[in-house]
Image (tube, rainbow, N blue to C red):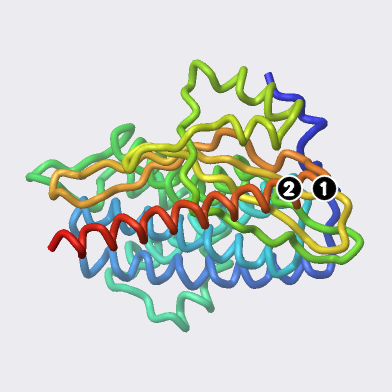
Amino acid sequence: MKNNALYFQSSNKFNWKKLALVYVCALLSAFVLGYLYILLNTYLPYVIISFFLAIGFGMGLTFIITFGLELSENRNKQTKVVLASVVGVFAWCSQWCAYIMMAQDGEFPSFSLYMYDFWAVMMPGEFFGTMYEISEVGFWSIFDYTPTGIMLALVWLLEFGIIAGIPFWTQYSAVEKPYSETQNKPYNTKTFDLAFSSVSDTEKDKFIAKVENNPLETIKTMGYGFDFAFSLLSLHDLEGETKQYLSLDNIVIKLDSEGKEEKEVNNVFQYLTIDNGTAANLLAYILQNQENDENIAEDETTEDENEV
């Protein structure tokens, strides 16, 4: 069990004005993306395409929200989660408004009509009343089957879970990155090329306890990894600060069905606090080992050339 007190602790600070600006930009983006989502679904009426469009919609919202939060230097997890929830629900409602207009008029609405009638369609009676009417008759078919009632509602629920769930879960599960309150900027991250041995799940708790007690000596005792399974160390540092941070990730290289490499990353620990002396010694140790590896590689290359 890791000791949370030894890891980076966020200040939970944020700026109300900057947050309000992020809300405006994210909601406007959701409004436009909702229209484009239904437009693409209308002209590409295939279930599998609709599924991936929903994923793309959710990921697009996530990118916009994350980008805005990083620019606004927001360190408050609660406000991040609330923002993602509000924008996700609004995005889902936006695409439904375009869908309802199309169902009522029999043709896809222009963007100007979408903007003009948006709030009228968003009225609860109009919004949910039309949803109920559509659920009674269905509005699309697959293999001559037209989903209606509960089955159609389940499809809509899945769509909601994808569109609103992706940005929500991204912010909810994210770990706060080290940030300097004195310098008002994030820490720099250096991920070293030196491949250490992987940390197994069975040894993970013991390893974390050791690295928390003595980071430098624990890292020194790690062996070298394999080409397909290893771990990479990252140093999060910022000049002028008294605290620096360490992270370690297990990396597994796999081949997909087409023989292409896929990299699977699993976190061992993130943002363990270390002092400047430990950071400097660790950096020197890693750079020395990297230089030794490069020299060994050069010697092997020279021997191969001589043999030829």
Q: Is residue 157 above or below residue 171?
A: above
Which residue is at the far left?
144
> Residue 295 lies in what quarter of the image?
bottom left
Pick the front one: 115 or 256: 256
Residue located 77% across and 29% down the image: 4
Residue 78 location (% of width, % of height): 75, 45
Residue at image location 46% in from the left, 32% down from the top:
198
| Furthest residue toward front | 306
Helix, strand or loop at label 1? It is helix
Q: Nearer the viewer, residue 183 or 82?
A: 183
CA gap, disc 1 and disc 2: 6 Å
Give the residue number, with chain letter if any, for mark 2: 281
Q: Residue at x 71, y 34 (%)?
A: 215
Task: Give the position of the C terminus as an image quadrant.
Answer: bottom left
Question: Answer yes or no: do the residues labelled 1 and 2 have beta carbons within 8 Å?
Answer: yes
Of residue 194 and residue 285, the one placed in the foreground of this image is 285
Q: Quadrant of the N terminus?
A: top right
In this picture, residue 174 sits left or right of residue 117: right
Q: Position of residue 231 (x, y in %)?
A: 48, 40
Residue topped by disc 1: 277
The amino acid pointed to by label 2 is Asn
Secondary structure under badge 2?
A: helix
